[in-house]
Image (cartoon, rainbow, N blue to C red):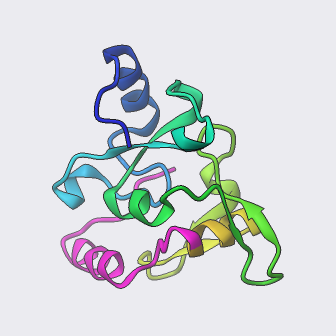
């Protein structure tokens, strides 16, 4: 997580991620908290502070991701590089279930990322249910 970012980088992130988590699509309006900035490849592993290596992430996704860059596909057990919001399209790897409260991994990358970032943790699923009751739907990807 980076506390200071040049204004130009912040503007690029805002334009790309639209104040929502690039992983679970939770919005700032729903969490009531500003997004954090995630280094897709952590700084400690040499990840640069450049647009290509940064994305908005909600606090939960950022904390669960930690320094991980890979996870395990629950179907095969294979080690898989986690979803990179700058090089991959969200809709190629994730979808919402019929209730629109759970994110479903469509590919090995998606499945591994859903598990590694705990994208359907109880707190966020409860929150999604409350938002649904208030007329919220996941933003269009
Ligand atoms: Zn998130």
Find residue 11 and report its horizontal and vertical position in percent.
Answer: 36, 22
Q: Is residue 50 magenta?
A: no
Q: Is residue 130 magenta?
A: yes
Find residue 23 and report its horizontal and vertical position in percent.
Answer: 50, 56
> Considering the image in quadrants, where does the N terminus appear?
top left
In the rendered view, tell whether residue 112 sits above or below residue 46: below
The magenta region covers 116-141
In the rendered view, tell whether residue 122 sits above or below residue 36: below
38 or 100, nearer to the observer: 38
| Residue depicted at x 47% and y 32% | 16
103 or 77, nearer to the observer: 77
Q: Which quadrant of the view contains residue 25? A: bottom left
In the rendered view, tell whether residue 59 sits above or below residue 133: above
In the rendered view, tell whether residue 108 sits above or below residue 29: below
| Residue depicted at x 76% and y 64% | 80
| Residue depicted at x 28% and y 82% | 126
| Residue depicted at x 48% and y 59% | 66
Q: Which quadrant of the view contains residue 127? A: bottom left
């Amino acid at each position: 997580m980076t506390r200071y970012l040049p204004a130009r980088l912040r503007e690029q992130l805002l334009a790309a991620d639209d104040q929502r988590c690039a992983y679970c699509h939770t919005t700032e309006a729903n969490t009531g908290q500003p997004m954090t900035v995630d280094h897709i490849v952590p700084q400690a592993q040499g990840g640069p502070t450049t647009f290509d290596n940064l994305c908005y992430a909600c606090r939960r996704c950022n904390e669960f991701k930690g320094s991980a860059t890979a996870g395990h596909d629950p179907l095969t057990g294979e080690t898989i590089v986690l979803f990179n919001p700058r090089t991959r399209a969200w809709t190629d790897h994730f979808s919402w279930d019929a209730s629109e409260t759970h994110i479903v991994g469509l590919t090995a990358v998606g499945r591994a990322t859903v598990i590694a970032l705990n994208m359907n943790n109880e707190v966020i699923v409860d929150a999604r249910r409350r938002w649904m009751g208030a007329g919220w739907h996941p933003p269009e990807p």
